[in-house]
Image: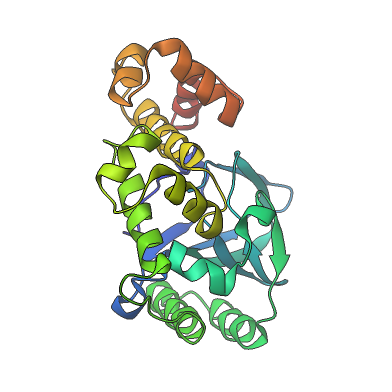
Amino acid sequence: MEQDQRGILYPDRLPEFHRLPAPTELEHAVRWFWIARWNLPPGLESRQELLPFPACNIVVEPQGVTAVGPPTRISERKLSGTGWVVGALLLPAAVPSLVPGPAELRDGSRPVSAGSLHSNISQLMATPEQHPREVRLRAVAAFSKWISERVPLPLPGSDHLLANELARVLADPGITRADQIPDRLPASTRSLQRLANRFFGLSLHTMIRRRRLQEAAALLRDDPSCSLADLASELGYSDHAHFSTDFKAVTGMTPSSYRTHSSEYRK
């Protein structure tokens, strides 16, 4: 999983980035952990653009710990000097405990009081890089312990468990409309919309669109031979025009422009 780059619009810009799986005991709470580290020469910046998963994160950086709400647009960050960041991409069942009221935190963040977590991760990330993989694994272990102490296992039949099942269904490329979901889960579309607002902070439509656009970005970047019309059809759009409108609304560029930009960064 360390090479999984979904949601990263320009992977070749990344100084160093890793995704690591959650331990078995946290499979109900964390989709994965992610770690970035950089050491750039003076005067050089690396601009990172992400099309993030529609989910909440807990993020540890040198300056503190934050809860990051669900994104509705591209996120951008300019890296310079030396730094690091360690994050946990949360599953819905963990959100009420760690990021309550996610709809109020769309495209935003709030500080988290987590002094021990910050201290433990900071000490590990300050470790010299002779054993980088061991440092990453130890950081994930420290993060996992902190989360496990705060997020209980979902009870059978609970909304928390249903929300995780909803996340699994939403990840299915075959789901292109919200009205398809009740065929897979024991709840009406209206009930699932309420569940999505509580555990994701986003509408079902928004999350389906985000997954389709992530898939589109990856295909545009990795398969230059794929036509835009074929791509739109594969992702469930009624036509090329609707796909292009959706893609530009979220990324700020047309599919063709993104394909051109991404190929330039690979040269």
Determine if residue 3 is in view.
Answer: no
Query: In the image, residue 44 lies at what x, y percent?
Result: 68, 46
Q: Which is more toward the observer, 120 or 252?
A: 252
| Nearest the eye: 3 or 71 | 71
> Compared with residue 193, is residue 126 higher up or lower down, i.e. above or below?
below
Residue 175, picture quadrant: top left
**Residue in view at x 35 percent, y 77 percent:** 155
Q: Position of residue 227 (x, y in %)?
A: 32, 14
For image coordinates 63% across by 85% down, the residue present is 119
Q: Identify whether 166 is placed above or below 76.
A: below
Q: Is residue 42 left or right of residue 265?
A: right
Q: Is residue 86 left or right of residue 219?
A: right
The mark total stands at 0
Q: Nearer the viewer, residue 114 or 172?
A: 172
Image coordinates of residue 111 in percent, x first then y, are: 72, 70
Which quadrant is home to the N terminus?
Answer: bottom left
Residue 239 seen in the current view: yes
* Relative image position of residue 113 (x, y in whole percent): 70, 80
Specify how the rendered protein is coloured.
rainbow
Residue found 38% across the figure and 26% down from its top? 220
Q: From the viewer's perspective, is residue 21 above or below residue 124?
A: above
Q: In what quadrant of the picture does the C terminus appear?
A: top left
